[in-house]
Amino acid sequence: MKELGLLLLLVGLISLVLPLINPNVQYVFLQWINNWGPNAAWAIRGGITLLGLVLWRVGGRRG
């Protein structure tokens, strides 16, 4: 779970940062998110990042 969480966290962070770096570029792998509208797109990006963070933190507690 820790690896999946780290992957989701990284994907989420990249998807959050890329539109801020160069907003004029249309990234193919982010287009499906943008089809939902700008507010939903940011919510999906934030949700993916948050889910990745939670999985990464919980996955590290093995016992």
Image (tube, helix red, strand yellow):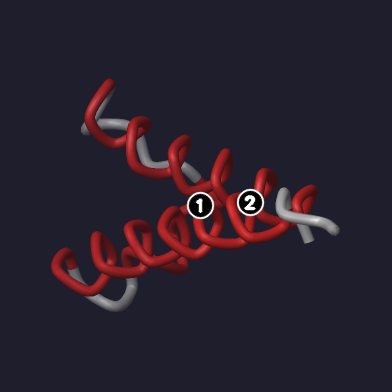
Q: What residue type is disc 2 on? A: Trp
Image quarter where the N terminus lies is: bottom right
Is residue 62 positioned above or below 39 on the image? above
Q: Residue furthest top?
A: 21
5 or 17, which is in the foreground?
A: 5
Quadrant of the rendered image containing residue 23 = top left
Say which residue appears at 44% left-offset and 53% top-offset: 49
Q: Is residue 32 left or right of residue 9?
A: left
For disc 2, the marked residue is 56
Q: Position of residue 56 (x, y in %)?
A: 63, 51
Q: CA distance from mark 1 to mark 2?
A: 5 Å
Is residue 22 positioned above or below 54 on the image? above
Q: What residue type is disc 1 on? A: Leu
Answer whether labels 1 and 2 touch (C-beta < 8 Å).
yes
Circle 2: element type? helix
Q: Position of residue 62 (x, y in %)?
A: 82, 56
Quadrant of the rendered image containing residue 6 = top right
41 or 1, which is in the foreground?
A: 1
For disc 1, the marked residue is 53
Q: Local crowd at mark 2 within 10 Å, few (<14), some, or many (≥20)?
A: many
Q: Residue furthest left?
A: 39
Circle 1: element type? helix
45 or 31, which is in the foreground?
A: 45
Say which residue appears at 63% left-offset and 60% top-offset: 58
Say which residue appears at 46% left-offset and 68% top-offset: 32
Q: Local crowd at mark 1 within 10 Å, few (<14), some, or many (≥20)?
A: many
Image quarter where the C terminus lies is: bottom right
Say which residue appears at 57% left-offset and 45% top-offset: 11
Tag of residue 13: none
Q: Position of residue 33 (x, y in %)?
A: 40, 66
Q: Is residue 23 left or right of residue 9?
A: left
Q: Position of residue 14 (x, y in %)?
A: 47, 35
